[in-house]
Image: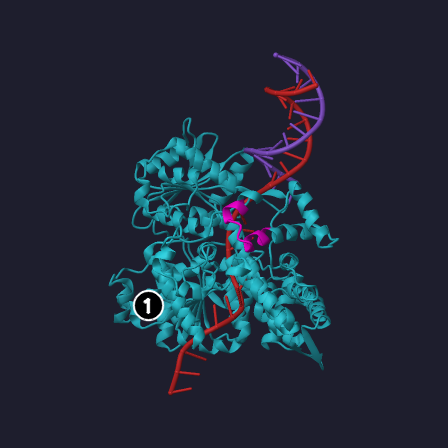
Chain colours: A cyan, B red, C purple
DNA sequence: CTCTCTAGTATTTAGACAGCATGTC
DNA sequence: CTAAATACTAGAGAG
């Protein structure tokens, strides 16, 4: 059926007037949603799931209701946001609500579609459960994420809340292929739409001992082994994506590709900011090769993704960052490692992850066919690889049963008023997948001990078996931090303020994942703990000390590359850590304002310094737009020490400073002037 | 006595979410 | 439980 046959005439504005024929699974999903049935669509990636979203969002809009689109990653939220913007042509107002994103105000009431991460959705719901009255549709992308041990429970909480609070809201789940899709559907009162359809056909094979095995047939690959497959792909105009299981492997593999291929990109033409890449990296890019992992800075990653999309980078080697992230397809995908070290063992990676990686093969519109190959290093791994391809699927399992998550959730339920007694909590949990998969009566003890813990630590109070959150409990829940973190921060406030020491306690909260320390770090870590009279030499404490030391370098303006080199980590690791610490230090500031007013200013400044990575003395001047830690420092060192100094400066005096063009100098002076005026008003 | 090589041993290992602010008759 | 690559170290042997 054509798009125009099932949608209002104006709808084609969304698709640039392309009136394509719907795929069968799209048609089926839309039909079921229109019958007011929840739906779970399970199809491979790149098979038009977004169009189902578009149509159902517009249907919902016409009924005067809002839609929410939940995704697992911030990068995916931004990608969806730019895709869904085309709905603006129909008057549908789209926004996104993710942590860290402060451009459009996230007034739910003013928008028709809200794109959110699962955590943001969770947080929004328990801050103000009433917003649900405005919603008619919630789309949950990558719903199989429920199975993710660390982040799945937050998504499961959101869906359970929807089922518990407002079963009228239509749910559309989009999922990878999993074995128990029926069970998930029953839990959500949904019908399933399952299809193996792919927009670009996929050919899969296993590379084993110099042979490529496809459909049981062996083909000898020659001396270059799997590299010959990459060669083939590139020479016929394609690109290749190689997944590896460690950063070092990804980098090494990229380096080795430089020796195999030489595409001779005109480096000048690529418009890469100077100093974005180091010499070795720039050399790889010049050869059309690069690696991608979370140790790279955000700017580096964005640039690499762009160069790959534009086709300048032909071979990209990556860790799992690219498996679940933004859509970055390539004609040929090679999964070079199928095991990864975790929990003390080297284990085969999950089938869902393999699906995601291999699903990247084949660019719609550009490639007639995609090629996905799995590399097996041993006979045992050959069997594992065969298992992936013959479709032994994993089930989605609830991970909501950890005690710390139950504490977090029970506080959220009480704080939001969704549940106020044990019975309410049990009723809520009765709606979870956890309950659908387990005997929920077995958790009563866990709920009671969570309630006891929360009461004992003044997060909640009780009267006649009815619980309500204290101010402390409410703030903890709103800050979205673990109650245990909140207690650590509260205790920290009793200690005399010292940046280093406070950074240590920030790092010690369970919400901060600390840096790993090595044997070679012992000496200075123990010295740090000694110096602060901390007698705890546990693993957590040592990790927190290392993290505190690195953050301390960051807030003292040590160049990010110097920190990276000294501690053997990547610039991306420092950015990520600073961003978590920013969140926790903000929480500390808020707790400080509640318990200990005296410390308030110190805590606010510490938060700004972590956010921006600056010393105290330039906190003010980096408020000027276009001035960050680097430019702020240069201005300060050249005598421009306040907003006033800069607002009244002459353009030539600032443009004389290294790194400041005339235009930039003008802009900065103007911005400083505006900022100044604002203060005078 | 010192340097070098080697065999055996120790070490290391992916990723990434959250808060805030704002509007207005 | 189901790894593999690399960095480190002690000790032998050469000069």
Nearer-the-camera pick, A152 or A639: A639
* Left or right: A341 as drawn, with respect to A275: right
Judging by the rendered image, the residue that carries numbered circle 1 is A87
**A464 falls in the magenta region:** no
Left or right: residue A518 versus residue A304 is right
Residue A562 on the magenta segment:
yes
Determine the residue positioned at 43% across, 37% down.
A280
Secondary element at image label 1: helix
The span shown in magenta is A550-564
Identify the residue at image location x=55%, y=72%. Answer: A126
Specify whether A423 is left or right of A228.
right
User: In terms of depth relative to the viewer, which is nearer, A37 or A650?
Assistant: A650
Q: For the N terminus of chain A, which image quadrant?
A: bottom left
Where residue A321 appears, as percent x and y from the top left, is: 48, 49
Residue A350 in view of the camera: yes
Q: Residue A230: x and y, percent?
A: 38, 36
Q: Is residue A186 visible?
A: no
Between A569 and A76, the one lying in front of the other is A569
Q: In this view, does A133 lie above or below A631?
A: below
């Amino acid at each position: 059926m054509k798009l125009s046959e099932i949608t209002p005439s104006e709808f084609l504005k969304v698709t640039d007037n392309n009136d394509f024929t719907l795929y069968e699974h799209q048609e089926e999903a839309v039909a079921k949603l229109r019958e007011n049935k929840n739906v779970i669509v399970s199809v491979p990636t790149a098979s038009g799931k977004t169009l189902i979203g578009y149509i159902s969002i517009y249907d919902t809009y016409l009924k005067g209701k809002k839609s929410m689109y939940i995704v697992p990653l911030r990068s995916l939220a931004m990608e969806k946001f730019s895709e869904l913007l085309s709905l603006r042509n129909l008057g549908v107002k789209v926004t996104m609500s993710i942590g860290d994103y402060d451009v459009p105000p996230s007034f739910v009431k003013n928008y028709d579609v809200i794109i959110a991460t699962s955590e943001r959705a969770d947080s929004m719901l328990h801050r103000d459960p009433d917003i649900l009255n405005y919603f008619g549709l919630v789309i949950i992308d990558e719903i199989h994420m429920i199975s993710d041990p660390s982040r799945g429970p937050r998504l499961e909480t959101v869906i359970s809340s929807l089922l518990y609070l407002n079963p009228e809201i239509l749910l559309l789940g989009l999922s990878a292929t999993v074995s128990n899709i029926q069970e998930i559907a029953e839990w959500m009162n949904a019908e399933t739409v399952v299809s193996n359809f792919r927009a670009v056909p996929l050919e899969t094979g296993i590379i084993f001992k110099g042979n490529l095995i496809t459909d049981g047939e062996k083909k000898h690959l020659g001396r270059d082994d799997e590299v010959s497959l990459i060669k083939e792909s590139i020479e016929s105009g394609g690109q290749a994506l190689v997944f590896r299981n460690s950063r070092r492997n990804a980098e090494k593999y990229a380096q080795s590709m430089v020796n195999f291929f030489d595409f001779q990109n005109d480096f000048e033409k690529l418009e890469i900011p100077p100093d974005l890449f180091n010499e070795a990296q720039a050399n790889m890019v010049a050869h059309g090769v690069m690696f991608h992992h979370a140790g790279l800075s955000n700017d580096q990653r964005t640039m690499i993704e762009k160069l790959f999309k534009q086709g300048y980078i032909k071979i990209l080697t990556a860790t799992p960052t690219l498996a679940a992230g933004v859509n970055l397809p390539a004609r040929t995908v090679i999964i070079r490692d199928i095991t990864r070290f975790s929990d003390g063992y080297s284990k085969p990676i999950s089938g869902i992850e393999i699906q995601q990686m291999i699903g990247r093969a084949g660019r719609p519109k550009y490639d007639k066919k995609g090629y996905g190959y799995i590399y097996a290093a041993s006979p045992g791994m050959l069997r594992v690889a065969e298992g992936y391809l013959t479709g032994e699927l994993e089930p989605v399992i609830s991970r909501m049963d950890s005690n710390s998550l139950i504490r977090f959730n029970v506080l959220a339920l009480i704080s939001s008023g969704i549940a106020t007694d044990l019975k309410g909590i049990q009723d809520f949990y009765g709606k979870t997948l956890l309950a659908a998969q387990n005997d929920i009566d077995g958790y009563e003890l866990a709920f009671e001990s969570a309630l006891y813990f929360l009461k004992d630590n003044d997060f909640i109070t009780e009267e006649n078996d009815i619980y309500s959150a204290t101010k402390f409990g409410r703030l903890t829940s709103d800050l979205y931090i673990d109650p245990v973190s909140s207690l650590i921060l509260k205790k920290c406030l009793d200690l005399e303020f010292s940046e280093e020491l406070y950074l240590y306690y920030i790092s010690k909260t369970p919400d901060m994942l600390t840096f790993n320390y090595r044997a070679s770090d012992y000496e200075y870590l123990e010295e740090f703990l000694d110096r602060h009279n901390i007698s705890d030499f546990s693993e957590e404490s040592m990790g927190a000390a290392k993290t505190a030391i690195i953050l301390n370098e960051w807030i003292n303006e040590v160049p990010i590359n110097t920190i990276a080199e000294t501690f053997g980590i990547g610039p991306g690791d420092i950015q990520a850590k600073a961003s978590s610490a920013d969140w926790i230090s903000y929480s500390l500031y808020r707790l400080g304002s509640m318990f200990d007013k005296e410390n308030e200013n110190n805590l606010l400044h510490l938060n700004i310094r972590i956010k921006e990575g600056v010393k105290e003395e330039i906190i003010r001047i980096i408020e000027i737009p276009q001035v960050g830690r680097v430019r702020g420092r240069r201005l300060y060192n050249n005598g421009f020490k306040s907003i006033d100094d800069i607002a009244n400066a002459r353009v030539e005096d600032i443009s004389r400073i290294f790194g400041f063009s005339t235009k930039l100098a003008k802009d900065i002076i103007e911005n400083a002037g505006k900022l100044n005026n604002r203060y005078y008003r």
